[in-house]
Image (cartoon, grey):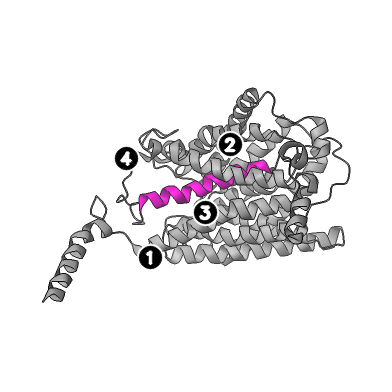
Amino acid sequence: MKEFRFKRVLLFISVIQLPILSFAEDGGAIDTGNTAWMLMSTALVMLMTPAGLALFYGGLTQSKSVLNTVGMSYVAYLIGSLVWVIIGYSLAFSPGNEFIGGLNYLLLNGISVTDIVDGANIPKLLDVAFQGTFAAIALAIVSGSVIERIRFSTWMWFSMLWIIVVYAPICHWVWGSEGFLHGDLDFAGGTVIHINAGVSGLILALLVGRRVNLHEERRPSSIKFMILGSALLWFGWFGFNGGSAYGANASAANALLVTNVAACAGGIVWLLIEMLIIKKPTLIGVASGAISGLVCITPAAGFVGVPGALILGAVGSVIGYLGVVKLKEYFGHDDTLDAFGMHGLVGIAGALLTGLLANPAIDPLSAGVFYGNPGQFFIQLKSVTATILYSGVGTFIVYKVAAYFTKGGRITEDMELEGMDIGYHGEQHMAIEKEMLSG
């Protein structure tokens, strides 16, 4: 009898909790399948910054500054995540005007644990977390342009201000419901992330200046780490693009497939270019090609099929190669790890090609020039132009403010020659590794 009563009590508790667990304030049911996929996607994108990009950038830089380089990506994730939940998400997605959101969601005020995202039926807090990983990696990409010579304190100030002044407004323009670039086809961040970060990186590199003895031979600290980092980025990109479907659905499946196809095409094309021009296919080249393919497919992942992905991957690789090898050689700017060459230029190509290749068979609401909608290309061009102009001006202002608070943004020449790891952080990665192996 007691056992029967106990079961009835448990049943009663379960019933009264059902509305809390299964429904949002507006009565919409949470879709557990979509939620599970978005939880996984958020975790995948998180992996891209403090692990994937940190290893990719760290492996490419000189041994004497590798820890500093890794630290810039790591700290970018920390600062980007905090600024995002404090004010960034509000400026990007709360009601405002066509240029900027309001402060309705400051410190996530006004967002309940039971609120859901319309259409996707996932918790709104999950959307905050997912979008926060995007903001963090966009910021970390910028760091690649100025490693080995910018003050760490300047980078921290720059990181805080850049999310607020540059990233959040552009995010609102493209992905906010009121944004004036709302018609732009940017499935997962070609404009918001790659063009934005690439242009910011170039402006920052020009402001900080070129490295000392730039034309001396500089060897990467670890090609193995760089390859591992590129693989982690590739892995995380499935959440980056697939998660941008906001559901466990056909669009996510297509995005995952075309993401992989574009990366493979990009890697092979870069390999063939090197075999043709320098007669030596390099692993750095293969990984760079794969990343270029991933960047180029990002805005189009929800709008093209496999044929479009092959084109985007191949074109992205060619543009990336020209940006990394030829453009820097011609202009002489010091974009250290090619944030502009590999993200900015390839992001521009991907955004514009999306306006040509968007296929209504993949997304019935989106069509490019080749499918009877010539106006879409001009929408893409408007978005690209606005992003370049605002990102460039915004980055200039943010850097000047950050440099003012840190008494100049650049380290001394002596410290640069000694290396950031010992001179600035008092650490040395080879010594640490030897200690770990001997211990």
Kindly report the secondary structure that dominates the magenta region of the rendered protein. Answer: helix
Task: Give the numbered dot on residue 368.
Answer: 3
At label 1, the amino acid type is Gly
Identify the secondary structure beneath mark 4: loop
In this rendered view, identify the residue nearer to me: 227 or 167.
227
| Residue 420 image point, x, y percent | 75, 39
Identify the secondary structure beneath mark 2: helix
In this rendered view, identify the residue nearer to me: 320 or 378.
320
| Residue 141 image point, x, y percent | 63, 45
Mark 1 or 2: in front is 2
Q: Is 420 rendered above or below residue 254?
A: above
Q: Earlier in the sequence, mark 4 or mark 2?
A: 4
- Label 2: which residue? 159
- Label 4: which residue? 110
Q: Residues within 10 Å of mark 2 (few under 14, many from 20)?
A: many
Q: Going by the image, does 156 lie left or right of 2?
A: right
Q: Earlier in the sequence, mark 1 or mark 3?
A: 1
In this rendered view, identify the residue nearer to me: 28 or 251.
28
At label 2, the amino acid type is Ser
Locate residue 27: give its quadrant: bottom left
**Residue shown at the point (78%, 56%) measured from the top left:** 434
**Residue shown at the point (42%, 42%) measured from the top left:** 176
Task: Give the numbered dot on residue 33.
Answer: 1
Distance CA(mark 1)–CA(mark 3): 31 Å
Q: Earlier in the sequence, mark 2 or mark 3?
A: 2
Whether residue 193 is visible to the viewer of this picture, yes or no, is no
Q: Are marks 1 and 3 in contact (CB under 8 Å)?
A: no
